[in-house]
Amino acid sequence: MPPPRSAPAPGRAGEAGQTAALLINIGTPAAPTAPAVRRYLREFLSDPRVVETPRILWWPILHGIVLNTRPAKSAKRYAAIWTDEGSPLEAHTRRQAALLRGFLGQSGHRVRVDYAMRYGRPSIAETLTRLAGEGCARILLLPLHPQYSAGATASAFDAAFRWAASVRDQPELRTVRGFAAEPGYIEALAASVRRHWAAHGPPDSSCRLVMSFHGIPAKAAERGDPYRDECLTTGRLLARALGLGEDRCVIAFQSRFGSARWLQPYTAEALENLARQGIRRVDALCPGFPADCLETLEEIAVTGKSIFLRAGGREFFPIPCLNENEDWIRALQALVLRHLQGWPTR
């Protein structure tokens, strides 16, 4: 077994070193092309946290079928949302990190803020190596997944701890497990919905607020993953903040993959059922995605809208993710500062 790699020392002897916060998002292909999507999917779907099927069963399916059929289809979907800045997910995450860095600085806190992707680039390992090399002795790991799940949050921590296991002179590491009930996060979501209502009119009895969260396999929840409960907590708190009764809100789960049972109700089926029940308007929000991405810009705003309208609905409004909203960045600032307590930031 080779000896651990050495990272440059976080700080000279006798010096405090710097404090940093690392925002971690799920990841994105480098380009909307089949080869780039294939590389991304290979890394993503090879993670045993994401696909818990035994390797001996999953590997032939992944390499013999999925990676030969899915990349071209997914690349077309990515191409439909790609921007001049590249991937919307990467662009929003980069801007969130820059704004958070600025807000912290304006408040008198000297905190390095950077971002990384669990899959793709910039990777967690390369970003941590750079931060340590630039003198960061303390690093807060903040996955941008409000609701904890093993397949997203824990996987991000796995990658960070694997990096730490390869480094001789480790920085201190802290983790933020999630923030499903964080008051600032809930209020930022509520403010986003209120702005939407101000622009498009308040909802009436024939309107529903659909809160669509990314799904996970039902078996994961049955094995103890708390993700579903945390999604329900966020939905309940958001409805309360908006003054909406349970009959005016629908919580559903999207992005199902494969033939196994996932968390239900499925968003696509929920949208179709609402239209058939006579609901004329849907306002669709994705609280689990702090940044717009393929799942919000294409799966909900395009495909979800089409499903609802084809089934007889009249109006479908996708509400943008939190992205660079100031109230969201302020909520991030409060969250980071609470978790940095005891570390020097001034």
Image (cartoon, helix red, strand yellow):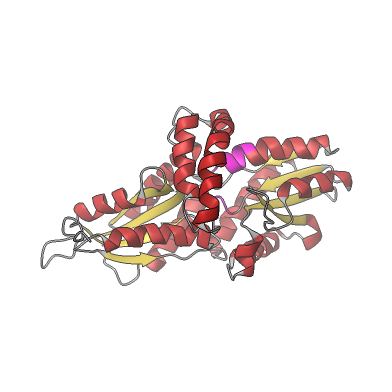
Image coords of residue 24 (percent x, y)? 42, 52
Q: What stretch is highlighted in magenta?
A: 288-298
Queried whether the magenta region covers residue 295, the answer comes back as yes
Residue at left 69%, top 63%?
240
Image coords of residue 159 (percent x, y)? 38, 57
Residue at left 47%, top 54%?
47
Residue at left 49%, top 59%?
49
The residue furthest left is: 13
* Vertical side of 12 occupied by 117: above or below: above
Left or right: residue 298 versus residue 39 is: right
Left or right: residue 25 versus residue 299 is: left
Image coords of residue 137 (percent x, y)? 23, 62
Image coords of residue 16 (percent x, y)? 18, 65
Between 103 and 13, which is closer to the camera in this rendering? 13
Q: Is residue 107 visible?
A: no
Quadrant that contains the N terminus: bottom left
Could you say which quadrant of the image residue 222 lies in?
bottom right
